[in-house]
Image (cartoon, rainbow, N blue to C red):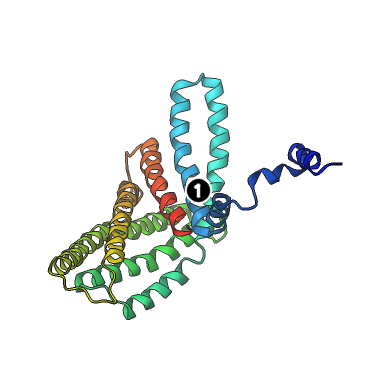
């Protein structure tokens, strides 16, 4: 059999269809790195969890009653375990938090205000994580806690999450101010020709641009979280479930974007 004929047969052979991906596939490698990370998997599940609420709202208004009830029930049966799994994925959340608290003290931000804000955020999370875990264990009757106490614990966990989110706006403002000062100083030095040989002003400007882009993404994520944390922090809230889906879904898109870039 000629070499040309053998190669043609290999191309059409369904058992060798993976060969169509080529000898290397950077996009597939990137996707696998993304999904292999806890952060990447969590954000995909977050997307499913919140956008399912919007789909349910749409079905309840556009589909025939019988069809809607059946589909809504199936989606809820899927999104419920997804939400549970996301909480379970955070079982070790305190460990990286303690690690970052240690890192922060030896690598402090340029302003005292930013340092204070981050310290407060860290302590808010230190309290939030155990409360969320206790809430989940109580809600699933793993530990003997009454429903009333379980709901109260869940509400307080969200209040600490809300405090983190509110403080994040202050941290972002401080980050913007410090970034603006850094950019202004660099531009003045470039204009004056006051650049050392070992310095790379283009790389520094690229770093400033990347940090600014990261700030915009974090602001969008935080804006998606804010109404959710306030809603879950209240004993009685009239915030509709579809808006939980809208704001959570909005945050999930930017979370996926950030997690995807983190494993580039």
Q: Position of residue 103 (x, y in %)?
A: 37, 77
Res. 28 visible in picture:
yes
Residue located beneath label 1 in the image: 44
Q: Position of residue 236 (x, y in %)?
A: 32, 44
Q: For the point 39% across and 55% down, which residue is it?
A: 152
Q: For the point 48% across and 55% down, which residue is it?
A: 146
Is 130 placed left or right of 109 in the picture? right
SS under mark 1: helix
Q: Position of residue 130 (x, y in %)?
A: 45, 65
Above or below: residue 263 compared with residue 223: below
Residue reaching furthest to the right: 1
Q: Foreground: 151 or 15?
A: 15
Q: For the point 38% across and 59% down, which residue is it?
A: 157
Res. 145 visible in picture:
no
Q: Position of residue 142 (x, y in %)?
A: 57, 59
Is 136 placed left or right of 167 in the picture? right
Task: Pick the quarter of the image with the N terminus.
Answer: top right
The 10 Å Cα crowd at callout 1, few under 14, some 14 to 19, many 20 or more, is some
Q: Foreground: 14 or 58?
A: 14
Q: For the point 25% across and 57% down, which residue is it?
A: 169
Number of numbered discs = 1
Q: Foreground: 210 or 164?
A: 210
Residue reaching furthest to the top: 64
Q: Residue 172 sits in which quadrant?
A: bottom left
Q: Residue 74 sits in which quadrant?
A: top right
């Amino acid at each position: 059999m000629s070499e040309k004929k053998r190669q043609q047969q290999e191309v059409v052979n369904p058992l060798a269809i993976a060969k169509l991906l080529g000898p290397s596939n950077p996009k597939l490698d990137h996707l696998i790195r993304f999904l292999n990370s806890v952060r990447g998997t969590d954000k995909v599940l977050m997307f499913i969890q919140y956008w399912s609420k919007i789909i349910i709202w749409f079905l309840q208004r556009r589909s025939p009653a019988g069809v809607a009830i059946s589909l809504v029930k199936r989606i809820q049966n899927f999104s419920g375990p997804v939400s549970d799994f996301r909480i379970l994925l955070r079982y070790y959340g305190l460990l990286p938090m303690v690690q970052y608290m240690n890192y922060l003290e030896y690598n402090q931000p340029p302003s005292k205000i930013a340092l204070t804000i981050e310290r407060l955020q860290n302590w808010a999370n230190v309290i939030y994580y155990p409360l969320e875990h206790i809430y989940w264990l109580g809600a699933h009757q793993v530990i003997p806690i009454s429903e009333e106490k379980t709901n109260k614990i869940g509400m307080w966990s969200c209040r600490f999450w809300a405090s983190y989110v509110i403080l994040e706006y202050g941290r972002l403002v401080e980050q913007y101010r410090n970034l603006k000062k850094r950019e202004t100083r660099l531009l003045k030095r470039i204009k004056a020709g006051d650049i050392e040989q070992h310095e790379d002003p283009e790389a520094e400007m690229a770093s400033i641009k990347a940090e600014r882009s990261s700030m915009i993404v974090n602001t969008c994520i935080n804006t998606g979280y804010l109404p959710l944390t306030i809603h879950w922090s209240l004993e009685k809230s009239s915030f509709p479930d579809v808006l939980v889906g809208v704001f959570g879904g909005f945050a999930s898109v930017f979370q996926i974007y950030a997690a995807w870039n983190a494993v580039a």
